[in-house]
Image (cartoon, grey):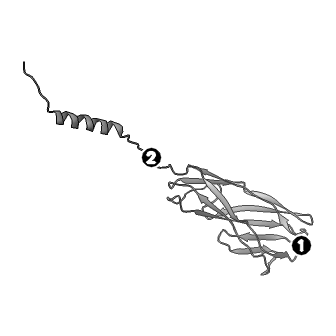
Amino acid sequence: MKKIVLNRSFVRLFVLMAVFFLGISFSYAQPDLPQRAVSVTATQSIHFGTFCLTGAGGGTVVLGYDGSLNSTGDIFLSALAPVAQPAIFDIKLCQGRNVTITYDPTTTLTGSNGGSFTLDIGPTEKGVSGSVFPVNNDCNFITTLRVGGTLNIPGSSPSGTYTGSFSITFEQE
């Protein structure tokens, strides 16, 4: 039978190394996962500016998502403040996902002195209701969505301030 003799210094080194490696704990962590929920902030309300009805025929005021403003019929667009502006929403969603926008096509605005206007919502700079568009890839960037619309003004509308609201749903894919 063959006898194995270990050098004492080798055994001590082996034991010290075993204690050293067993005493070290390894910890692996994943980075924080990016935000998966869509975040939307309304940064500007839609406003059709100042205008007046000059006849009994009524008409429309058309506000583009780009801020362009036009009228039809008996509507005079005034340069007085407040000026027309599209609605603006800031959308934040990481990883370059797609977002679907949906909204009701019309809503009613009521006047401070009676009367009502119908507001046809849209289009947006990303398309009409049901459109799908990608958001920016980086979590630090914001995708802006501008929304315009068309006011339908009856000829019998009293002067005043007309207010109302609309909602847009943003769904991530």
Residue 154 placement, left or right of 147: right
Q: Indicate the amino acid at tag 1.
A: Ala
Q: Which residue is mark 1?
A: 56
Residue 2 on image: x %, y %? 7, 21
Residue 117 on image: x %, y %? 83, 63
Kindly state the secondary structure of the residue where label 1 is placed: loop
Question: Do tag 2 and tag 1 residues touch (Cβ < 8 Å)?
Answer: no
Residue 4 placement, left or right of 131: left
Q: Which residue is mark 2?
A: 30
Residue 123 on image: x %, y %? 66, 63
Residue 144: quarter of image: bottom right
Given residues 158 and 1, the one toward you in this image is 1
Q: Residue furthest bottom?
A: 79
Kindly state the secondary structure of the residue where label 2 is placed: loop
Identify whether 150 is placed above or below 31: below
Q: Residue furthest top?
A: 1
Lower position in the chain sequence, tag 2 or tag 1: 2
Residue 156: quarter of image: bottom right
User: Who's the residue at 60% across and 52% down the image?
Assistant: 38
Given residues 165 and 65, the one toward you in this image is 165
Q: The N terminus appears in which quarter of the rendering? A: top left
Q: Indicate the amino acid at tag 2.
A: Gln
* Label 1 crowd bin: few (<14), some (14–19), many (20+), radius 10 Å: few
